[in-house]
Structure formats: C-alpha cells, structure tokens
Image: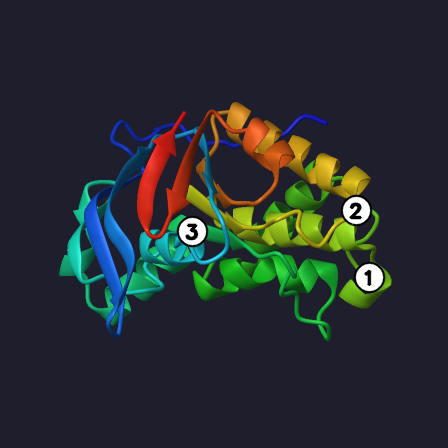
C-alpha cells in the first residue's frame, strides 16, 4: 500500500518540543522535568508502566491538558501563550488524534466520520468529498464509505479513525495505544499504515504503547517511570 502526504513546505523546526515540563495532579507529580523533541516524519514511542505519565504527556503535547511548569513548543509556538480558543484552533488544524477504542460516531457513515475535521475547518464541500475519497483509497477502504462503524471489523474501524486523523493534513499525529484493542494481524496492518504515512514525508507521530511490536516501528523510544524519562533509545 502506498500512501502520500502532500505538503510542499515541510516544517524545518521540530514539530513539537517539550522543555522541562512539570505536571501535578493535586499533590502528586505526574510529569517531572520531561524534555523531548520530534521532527517531521519521525515516529516516537512513549513506553513505560501504567501510571508512568505517558498519556498525560501525550495530552500535554496535544494541548488537551495544562502543565504547571516548563515549556511546550508546537512549530515554535509556545502553548502557554495560547488561550483556550487558540489551543482549540491549533488542535483542529494541526493535530490528529487516534484512540485505542476508535471513538467513531456510530450513527454516521465511514465517509461522514472522516469528513468531521474538514467540516470543523470549514473546507468547501467539493474539497471534502475529494479528500475523503482519497483517504478511503489510501487506507484500503474505498468500498466502505457508506458503511457504518458497527458494520466494520476492529481493524477497519481503526483505519477509519486514522483516515479521520489525517483528513486535515496535520503536522502531528498523537496515538494512544492504537493497536491495544486489535488482534495481532490487524495490529500489524495498522503499524504498517502508520509507517507508510510517516515515511512518505508525512506528519510526526507519537505513540503511547505497552507493546514492543509498536515501539519497534518507531525511530526512537522514550521510557517513562514515575513521570521521569529514565531511558531514551
């Protein structure tokens, strides 16, 4: 399967960069002086035991969760300088998210689910139709556009979720245990799809995972324990 990600002006800066980020929940320190950077087309795995801060870090990088100290830059923009409206706009236009449990709307067709980000960014209808058709072909679901999520396998639903995350051509994809709810064959297919997306001059990809197979497809991995980066490779 060949995927293309057409962007004639790739970013020269790190897509996202965290500098000494600290995050507390009440009296508990969840992230402790975490620093990292990810560049366009790069795949990064966040690994570590449950409760180590992986998902919290992912949410902070995506502007979904506030942090207490430090700095997160998105394409050079300091997230701390953005109000809630500007953060929502950034997420809507520049970030795609893939969840473990797909989070598709069951009453919408595959086409309608993928189209949601394009509607939010007010793309013209003809452009939306063309983009969704292209994405369906790229993720191998050209024949499933009129189906509903409940009519698809788990692997197919995750492909729809990935197509939705790619619809607005984000600079960064955040994936939280993207294969955790799939069988091994479907999971491997999803990993190959992610690899193709980034290898074709696509967005940066950060994946939270407990899986060695998922981490193995990444260029780098960061291992967290008790909110601290204890190993990077």
Counting residues from the N terminus, which is met first, the one under dot 3 or under dot 1?
3
Counting residues from the N terminus, which is met first, the one under dot 1 or under dot 2?
1
x and y, in percent, of residue 95 in the image = 41, 51
Task: Identify whether 17 is placed above or below 2.
Answer: below
Q: CA distance from mark 1 to mark 2?
A: 21 Å
Q: Look at mark 1 in the image and give the residue it sits on.
A: 147
Residue at the spot 71% in from the left edge and 54% down from the top edge: 181
Residue at the spot 57% in from the left edge and 45% down from the top edge: 210
Q: Residues within 10 Å of mark 3 (few under 14, many from 20)?
A: many
Task: Identify whether 209 is placed above or below 24.
Answer: above
Residue at the spot 41% in from the left edge and 43% down from the top edge: 172
x and y, in percent, of residue 231 in the image = 37, 32
Q: Look at mark 2 in the image and give the residue it sits on.
A: 183
Residue nearest the observer in this picture, 44 or 114: 44
Q: Look at mark 3 in the image and give the residue it sits on.
A: 54
Residue 12 — which label? none
Q: Are marks 2 and 3 in contact (CB under 8 Å)?
A: no
Q: Quadrant of the C terminus?
A: top left
Q: Nearer the viewer, mark 3 or mark 1?
A: 3
Q: Residues within 10 Å of mark 2 (few under 14, many from 20)?
A: few
Residue at the spot 47% in from the left edge and 45% down from the top edge: 48
Picture quadrant where residue 1 is located: top right
Q: Secondary structure at mark 2?
A: loop
Q: Left of 76 or right of it: where is 181? A: right
- The answer to whether residue 4 shows anywhere in this view is no
Q: CA distance from mark 3 to mark 1?
A: 34 Å
x and y, in percent, of residue 103 in the image = 62, 65
Q: Are marks 1 and 2 in contact (CB under 8 Å)?
A: no
Q: Secondary structure at mark 1?
A: loop
């Amino acid at each position: 399967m060949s995927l293309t990600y057409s962007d004639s002006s790739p970013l020269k800066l790190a897509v996202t960069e965290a500098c000494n980020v600290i995050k507390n929940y009440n009296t508990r320190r969840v992230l402790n002086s975490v620093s990292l950077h990810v560049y366009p087309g790069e795949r990064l795995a966040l690994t570590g035991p449950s409760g180590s801060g992986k998902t919290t870090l992912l949410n902070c990088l995506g502007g979904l969760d506030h942090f207490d100290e430090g700095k997160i830059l998105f394409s050079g923009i300091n997230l701390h300088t953005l109000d809630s409206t500007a953060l929502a706009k950034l997420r809507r236009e520049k970030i795609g998210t893939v969840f473990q449990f797909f989070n598709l709307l069951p009453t919408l067709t595959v086409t309608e689910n993928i189209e949601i980000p394009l509607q939010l960014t007010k793309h013209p209808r003809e452009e939306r139709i063309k983009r969704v058709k292209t994405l369906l072909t790229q993720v191998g679901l050209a024949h499933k556009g009129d189906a509903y999520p409940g009519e698809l396998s788990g692997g197919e639903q995750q492909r729809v979720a990935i197509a939705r995350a790619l619809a607005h051509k984000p600079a960064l994809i955040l994936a939280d245990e993207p294969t955790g709810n799939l069988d091994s064959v479907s999971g491997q297919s999803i990993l190959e799809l992610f690899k193709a997306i980034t290898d074709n001059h696509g967005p940066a990809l950060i994946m939270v995972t407990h899986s060695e197979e998922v981490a193995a497809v990444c260029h780098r991995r960061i291992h967290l324990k008790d909110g601290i980066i204890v190993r990077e490779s």
